Image (cartoon, grey):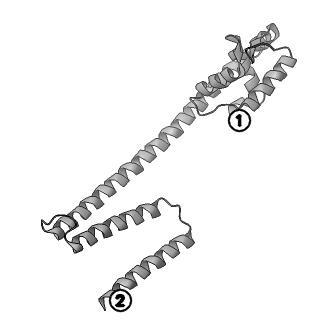
Amino acid sequence: MTAVFSHGRLRLYLLKLLDDGPKHGYELIRLLADRFHGTYAPSAGTIYPRLARMESEGLVTHAAAGGRKTYSITDDGRSELRQRAGELDALEKDINASVADLAAEIQAEVHGSARDLKRELKEAARQTRRGTWVVDVQLGGRPPGTDPQADFDRRLVAFSDEVRALVRRGRFSDDQLRTASRLLDGVLDGLRRMQR
């Protein structure tokens, strides 16, 4: 659970939400998720036991309708809210700070991802231009598929680009990269043998 709700603060916030009107448990979960812009949402296993405890303490009551329990704050619950008004103000400030921090982290991640994507697109465009130039020079005006050397060059550039992209994703272990390097060495040795 997010640190802003340590030490009974979630209970206090649930009282605040119920002070706005009766709600069922999943509505409380949704309101909390909305408050944190989707970056935090308590589970039903967090909310319902707290509501049951608050009910046993006389802070909330429930009414069953249509298979759902709708919770309402009691006078004792409102009294606790008034007594803890200063804590509630501090909690709201902490929630605002937490949401701002999360938004800043998300913005930094998005900015970093956009920067990486921009760099990768520039590299892909550069490689495409290089590959297209090689193919255009090799084709000498002939239609694709009619010049084996140009077709080989085009496939070699595409192969190289795809291998490079796969390795950049970083999903290979060191052993897998060594095996891939040996495979490439084997292909090169095979091409050398073909020229003998």
Q: Earlier in the sequence, mark 1 or mark 2?
A: 1
At label 1, counting other C-alpha atoms closer than 10 Å, the crowd grade (few under 14, some 14-19, many 20 or more) is few
Image position, residue 76 (x, y; %): 82, 10
Left or right: 98 in relation to 151: right
- Quadrant the N terminus occupies: top right
Residue 98 falls in image quadrant: top right
| Three-letter code, disc 1 | Met
Image position, residue 74 (x, y; %): 79, 9
Image position, residue 125 (x, y; %): 29, 55
Image position, residue 178 (x, y; %): 52, 75
Q: Secondary structure at mark 2?
A: helix
Mark number, residue 193:
2
Q: Is residue 9 visible?
A: no
- Quadrant the C terminus occupies: bottom left
Q: Up-down: is 173 above or below 67?
A: below
Left or right: 52 in relation to 118: right
Decide which of 78, 87 is in the foreground and name it: 78
Q: Secondary structure at mark 1?
A: loop
| Three-letter code, disc 2 | Arg
Residue mark closest to the camera, 1 vs 2: 2
Q: Label 1 belongs to which residue?
A: 1
Label total for image: 2
Q: Up-down: is 28 above or below 126?
A: above
